[in-house]
Image (spheres, rainbow, N blue to C red):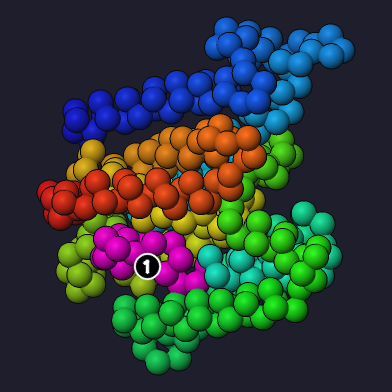
Amino acid sequence: MNLRARVVGCLCVVGLLVLALLSACIGRFPLQPGQVLHALLTVGHVPAQGDMVHTVLFGARLPRIGGAMCVGAALSVAGAAYQAVFRNPLVSPGLLGVLAGAGMGAALGIVWGMGHAGVAALSFLGGLAAVAFGVGVAQMFDATSMLMLIFGGLISSALFTALLSLLKYVADPQNQLPDIVFWLLGSLTQVTPQALVVLVGPVVMGIVLLSACGRMLDGLAMGDEEARTLGIPVMALRYGVIGGATVLAAMTVAVAGMIGWVGLVVPHVARLLVGPCNMRVLPVSACVGAMFLLVCDDLARTLSAEEIPVGLIADLLGVVVFVAVLPLLRRGWRA
């Protein structure tokens, strides 16, 4: 790793920690940085009854901050991995239908009247099922064709989007349909300490494993035949990375609903910072994605009296960032 990448990586980590501290201070009940640091340093101390700082920080704000960091990092790494596998800078985690499938699974859980845990589980399984269906369609025609894999993803996305629309049509318009719409808009309000504990381990493991494949993904960028001459197991790598990225993306929808643009925009920003080498792009994408969604969540919590769904803020801010970096995308991809 060159000096520039090391410096950028260190700055990203420091920036993420500072931003997390500032995010912990922002909200309906504002806190001072000193209060937050004191609460963190005395985390093992049982606070007196009615300690509002401890209640706000550990009961609501820190789980939400942790959720934003995990979701942003997972979506960004999934997007960077998809772009590397498909050798296309305009690919996002939803290419093979994972977002449509996860949304359909969540809607199905809501229509069936399942609790939050059941809805999250069905959302996760729906995302995996959608990608499996898309890959299965590609396997029926030409397992080695990238074009057929993309076609399979388009068919899967169309199918599960249609199923989602059907569920919205049959849902109770008074009770179930608003819940479905709110879920699809994306929100971090449902992130609890228990959910965060379940989320952190798989997300960190997925990011580490995908980052470890960075050098082989660089070889894959030269083409399948060239990669095989370097001893890279092309098909195993391609479907392994797709599987890992799909799991990361499905987990984010299960926890926070549909949040777009993060997986498309953030990898480009990472490439502008550290170049096209995937060994550097993937971990930097995780850090930048965590910061991006933290900023989105801070804006969602503070822009109005009523909280705005973070998915809407991510879409709006993602468009602005994408337009800003658009003139530099070619340099960021090929430099």
Q: Position of residue 129 (x, y in %)?
A: 60, 74
Q: Residue furthest front?
A: 305
Image position of 289 (left or right of 227): right
Query: In the rendered structure, which segment of residues is drawn in magenta?
Result: 82-98
**Residue at label 1?**
238
Three-letter amino acid code at disc 1?
Arg
Q: Position of residue 149 (x, y in %)?
A: 38, 79
Q: Secondary structure at mark 1?
A: helix
Residue at point 46% right, 35% down? 295
In the depicted structure, whether residue 63 falls above or below residue 86: above
**Residue 223 visible within the image:** yes
Q: Depth check: 15 or 182 in front?
A: 182
Image position of 226 (left or right of 188): left
Q: Residue furthest bottom?
A: 141
Q: Chief secondary structure of the magenta span?
A: loop
Q: Depth check: 292 or 275 in front?
A: 292
